[in-house]
Image (cartoon, rainbow, N blue to C red):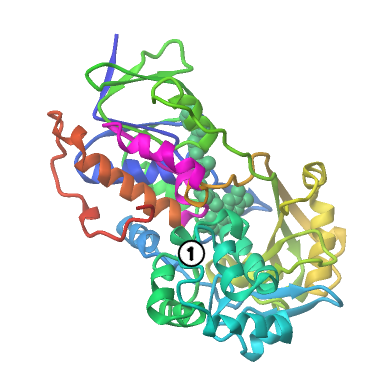
Amino acid sequence: MTDEREAVVVGAGMGGLTAAHALAAAGLRPLVLEAGDRVGGLVQHARVGGIDVDAGAESFALRRPEVADLVARLGLEHATPATASTIWLPGGGRALTTPTRSLLGIPADPLGDDVVAIVGPDAAARAAADLSLDPAAGAEAVSLAELVTVRMGADLLERLVRPVARGIHGADPENLAVDAVAPGLRGALVTHGSLAAAVAATVPDGPAVGCVVGGMWRLPAALAASAEVRTGTRVTAVEREADGTWVVHVDDDAAPPVRTRRLVLAVPGPETVGLLSGVLPGEVPELRAGHPIVQVTLVLEAPELDAAPLGSGALVGPDAEVRTKALTHATAKWAWLARTTPPGVHVLRLSYGRAGEDPAATEAVDAELARADAQALLGVPLAPAQVLDSLRVHRPLGLPPSAAADPALRPLLERVRATSGLGVCGAWVAGTGVAAVVAQAEQEARRLLEGPGARDGSTPGSTSPLSAVHPPILD
Ligand SMILES: Cc1cc2nc3c(=O)[nH]c(=O)nc-3n(C[C@H](O)[C@H](O)[C@H](O)COP(=O)(O)OP(=O)(O)OC[C@H]3O[C@@H](n4cnc5c(N)ncnc54)[C@H](O)[C@@H]3O)c2cc1C
């Protein structure tokens, strides 16, 4: 007994579902195999205190157009934050508005008052040295950290870029590929002569992030409707026959292996490497794990938060007295969410798991610590009795460094590209964040559709909307 499919996608996170949607839009009927009991992966729905909230990613970067385009194509709507975010600094708890003319915390005007207030005059002066540096300095940087350190110095990286990058992408700048999170920025650096000028030329006019109205979790739910998704099905092995057919084995003894000419692996890096180890020639690299992450959602009866003391929240700077790395005041940030909550009830999200922190300490984080941190950051008393409900989500694997930011992983990707009918996508390839993942998954689907596998007799029947292309992010 065999199960023949036009395309198989392994993993129903944002990468896998976006790839499946793109393949379906081109006329194929992909089968998606998902180990978990729900779709979305790190984009996850939860009901806390009777309120529908995002328990995973809660926004997407607007620097790239793909997610907003996809949201619109699916008939969903996106919203932008109702209030600005702040950077919270140690020493008495000063919350300062994130500089408006900035990209991932990189300022267009390093000597602007809003920048000096956050980083101090010395760090600002070092950052301004960018304006007179050789334009080629940093132009070959792979990671955001490398680019910022070379051009504007380590202090600006620590005090401004790191908290912002963590807040927007949930990752450290060392693990964010510049080309994935700020496409075109390195080119603009060379064209405009400095990083500050490059930011000024490329910074979006509007807000940096958006969210699907009703919750980010609606996006994978809508994408899943375009494919056949089999949840509770873990892929245990893949084989490749001499004629290029992929044979996909699952953990359900009653189900036959699935055969296909087009296979997309959209699972985390270590899983991908495991599944490909018997298929791709050559040595398979070892992938570093990420730092564990704990995220706590609190639903509070707290009318004193109606005034939104921190705007949409705070990205916590280095050496702060609190343990959290970011607080999102979700009901202040998203007007659509505020409309669904009773008067005086607020939703807060606090993220834990700084790089370098003892993983056991991160894992010990609970709702009580989150309440205390929220009280310290927001500057209003929040008694335990005000917490109506809470949700703690632990991600033991955290956010592993991506291949886009790690040149050592590129040879593996090149071998994948040379293998007909095989695609890989997801955050470990694209870089962390829904925006990068969606863009790369669309690109990978397009590559599969245009590659040799497209000439195997099951050529897609309609033109993909992806032919209205956005620039590739890895090439
Ligand atoms: C706490 C947290 C907050 C975040 N916040 C934001 C944010 O606000 N904005 C933003 O842009 N990004 C955010 N991110 C990052 C973003 O969520 C991820 O980069 C993105 O969702 C990753 O998608 P993915 O498809 O690569 O992987 P995943 O979401 O991990 O999906 C992979 C899927 O593969 C399945 N799978 C694994 N192995 C197998 C197997 N053998 N067989 C079948 N299925 C398998 C898994 O069950 C999973 O569903 C956040 C991440 C975290 C952890």
Q: Which residue sits at x=72%, y=61%?
A: 325
On the image, which quarter does residue 7 sit in?
top left
Q: Could one spot residue 36 in this view of the protein?
A: no
Kindly give the residue lying farthest to the front in the view shown.
134
Q: Which residue sits at x=47%, y=54%?
A: 434
Q: Is residue 287 left or right of residue 279?
A: right
Q: Could one spot residue 281 in this view of the protein?
A: yes
Kindly give the residue lying farthest to the bottom in the view shown.
113
Q: Is mark 1 within 8 Å of ligand 1?
A: yes
The quarter of the image holding the N terminus is top left
Residue 284, image x and y in percent? 49, 29
Nearer to the camera, 9 or 240: 240
- Residue identifier under label 1: 61
Highlighted magenta segment, given as a residue range: 407-434
Nearer to the camera, 422 or 39: 422
Image vertical order of residue 134 relative to residue 348, above or below: below
Residue 175, image x and y in percent? 58, 53
Residue 193, image x and y in percent? 44, 81
Q: Which residue sits at x=44%, y=55%?
A: 436
Q: Which residue sits at x=61%, y=39%?
A: 288
Reply yes or no: does residue 415 show up in magenta. yes
Q: Secondary structure at mark 1?
A: strand
User: Circle 1: is it few (<14), some (14-19), or many (20+) Cα within 10 Å?
Assistant: many
Nearer to the camera, 427 or 373: 427
Reply yes or no: does residue 388 show up in magenta. no
Nearer to the camera, 257 or 346: 257
